[in-house]
Amino acid sequence: MKPAVTMRAVQLRDYSGSPASLGVAEVPVPHPGPGEVLVRVFASPVNPSDLSFIRGMYSFRKPLPAVPGFEGCGTVVSSGSGLLPTLLKGRRVACSVSDASARGGMWAEYTVASANRCVPLRKEVEMEQGATMLVNPLTAWAIMHEIRRGRHRAAVITAAAGALGRMVIRLGRRMDVPVIGIVRRPEQMDVLRGMGVDHALDSSHPEFDARLRERCHSLGATIAFDAISGEMSGRVLRAQPQGSRLLIYGALSESAAQLPPPSLIFEAKRVEGLWLSAWMRQRNILSQLSIARRIQGMVGSDLKSEIQARRPLEEAVRGLEEYAANMTAGKVLLMPGLSAWC
């Protein structure tokens, strides 16, 4: 069955971040080139990186109008030249279009993706979990890799009640690595307590800094991962033992990291960035396939994503607002096949 000639797609008209910058338009269905496949999209989640992109705050901007959406899943309906694209035809895949060179986005009925950025889904993997299989689970895996590679006894993660934070905590349990989870509101503590987290801290508590320092030193948390930036980066870095690493992988505060010079100068602490796309490019294709296989085995358990809402493309703005207002509740999926009247 040949795909349609035109399709519905969410279009970004400017980088202001306002609701008026997004709308649904009828556009031509893209054609896959060499090494590419055409995917009929089943679902695509809203991620913090998507929010950054539509606000013009991501690592790159695309010519406008552009179709947002960095990850998702669907079925390969046609392919360009090359062995791998041909082998993927007819397969259910999770795929990523998060590079600046990607021609399309996932918030559409169809998208073109590089065959190298597609992961065939095993039969037992549900499509909704396949849609959220790459960004958060791969980042959680990269975080645990950095912890184990550096032989760190324990770790710290901010935004711990979010999907990624919970994944890291569960992987820490599996790999016997204590994880200190930091949240920003008392109600988010209930999420971690419900998971039975031993080391949960609320940064709004007046004794937070003292408690964080005590936990970092007693557990040996010499590596930390910060999704918030702003003043949080400095608070975590100050609390860590001498010689620690802080990896910043997000900026939910939308503020520059505030770092204490004494920690860097006198305590030999290091601050680095962690970007999943760059981390994955450092792995060869066999390593990437091995990671993908292991992740698929855990998307129903340790790497499972909670879904708070499902929206058709026409309700993309509503979906973004829902997710931004309560990321802790889970992902919002944009689903091209879902009727706006459901």
Image (cartoon, grey):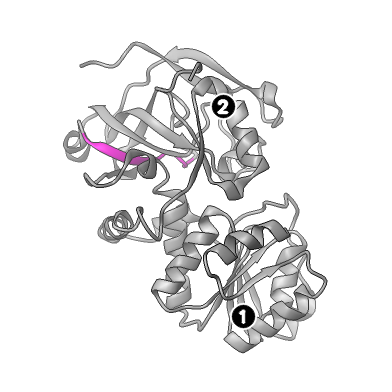
Question: Is residue 131 toward the left or the right of residue 183 in the image?
Answer: left
The mark that comes first in sequence, 1 or 2, is 1
Evaluate whether residue 288 shows in this view.
Answer: yes
**98 falls in the magenta region:** yes
Is 80 on the left-hand or right-hand side of 337? left
Q: Residue at (61%, 43%) from the top-left corner?
A: 58
Residue 11, quarter of picture: top right
- Left or right: 103 with respect to 211? left
Task: Tell me the kind of residue under disc 1.
Answer: Ser
Q: Secondary structure at mark 2?
A: helix
**Residue at position x 23%, y 15% from top?**
2
Q: Residue drawn 33% across and 33% down? A: 74
In the image shown, does 196 or 248 lie closer to the viewer? Answer: 196
Q: Which residues are magenta?
A: 91-99
From this view, report whether residue 291 is shown above or below residue 243.
above
Res. 292 image quadrant: bottom left
Please tell me the numbered disc located at residue 316.
2
Determine the CA span between mark 1 and mark 2: 41 Å
Q: Is residue 210 left or right of residue 111?
A: right
Label 1 or label 2, whichever lies nearer to me, is 2
Instruction: Determine contact: label 1, label 2, CB under 8 Å.
Output: no
The amino acid sitting under disc 2 is: Ala
Q: Position of residue 109 (x, y in %)?
A: 40, 22
Q: Element at badge 1?
A: loop
Residue shown at 50% from the left, 16% from the top: 341
- Outermost residue to the bottom: 218
Question: Which numbered dot is residue 244?
Answer: 1
Residue 317 versus residue 204: which sits nearer the camera? Answer: 204
For the N terminus, give its image quadrant. Answer: top left
